[in-house]
Amino acid sequence: MPSKGKEKIFEVAEELKKRTSAENKGFKVVVTGKGGVGKTTTTAILAHLFANDGYNVLAVDEDPQMNLPFALGVDKAKASTIIPLSKNLDYIEEKTGARPGTSWGLFLNLTPDISDVVDKFGIRIKDNLSVLVMGTVVQAATGCLCPENALLDAVMRYISLKRNEMILLDTQAGVEHFGRALAKGFRHCVVVTEPTFNSMDVAKHTAKLARQIGIPNVFLLVNKVRVEKDKSKALEYIENESLFDRVFFTPFDDKILECEPYIEPILKKDNDFLKTLIKLKNELEERDKKFTMLQ
């Protein structure tokens, strides 16, 4: 594509950012972290906890493995047939004016009307809980303005949230979604980790990026804690305490791992893992109410 064309698209994108006035409105939580630490389980449990408390919850799956529908209770056979939004080429072309994989010149619509996206592609788990499988753009680079990213970005930015409505975004492993600012406009970030050096290193990097794109509340959930020393090791790894507003710890539990990602058995039993997630849910709710009162 000619350099002048790229420059024009970036100019349009910058202008759209200036015009966006509602990015931080609504109860939006992004759940992220290193692969295999329990992001999907955490997202699914939080979704059910908030739904049980009367919230209308939209759980959004941005992980390419697409395990969130199954974790939430969608039949595994049905979940395996779901085509993610990023692969619905006809819909992307309809909304953005460009078909992925084709030459789209200067005709890319960066503000597609996605008001029908939940009705068309959302899967209802129960009356006040739905899941939307977005998929991801594996080859995306920072600032990519390809049709798929334009659509996924619009979905996250422009879904209007009313009172007692919320979005929970389950992301792919790593920090690529922050690289293209998909989570921009979210009020809360839950970074899920394990008490290991590599996992904590990713957690710290993620927290820094979350702060950079303006997420005001960042929490750390340390899973699979076997002994008390694991907690002290995790706190030592953090170093900079200002990265996280609060740290939560869950114990290692073979039964949790056995049922992952299907979370119904966890919800039905009185266990320390669930108790910690309830505390996290209450903290998110309290912070969001305070944030709303200040607006």
Image: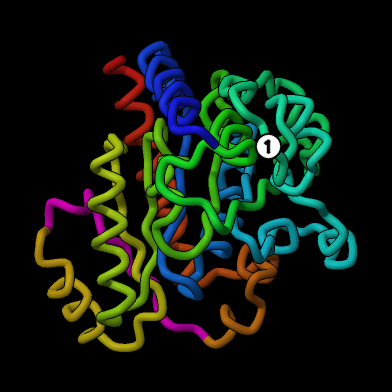
- Look at 71% across and 42% down and name the residue there: 100
- Look at 55% across and 69% down and name the residue there: 270
Does residue 49 show up magenta in the picture?
Answer: no
Q: In this view, does 10 lie above or below 79?
A: above
Q: Which of 105 and 64 is in front in this view?
A: 105
Regarding residue 131, the answer to whether it shows in the image is no
- Look at 46% across and 31% down and name the residue there: 6
Q: Return the x and y of residue 115 as percentages of the image width and height.
A: 70, 20
Does residue 246 show up magenta in the picture?
Answer: yes
Q: Return the x and y of residue 252 as percentages of the image width and height.
A: 43, 83
Question: What residue type is disc 1 on?
Answer: Ser
Q: In this view, does 236 lie above or below 211?
A: below
- Look at 10% across and 60% down and name the residue there: 240
Q: Nearer the viewer, residue 171 or 251?
A: 171
Q: Return the x and y of residue 188 as percentages of the image width and height.
A: 37, 41
Q: Which of 67 and 56 is in front in this view?
A: 67
Q: Which residue is tagged 1?
A: 103
Mark 1 burial class by Cα count in 10 Å: few <14, some 14-19, many 20+: few
Name the secondary structure under disc 1.
loop
Task: Report the magenta residues as a range.
Answer: 241-253
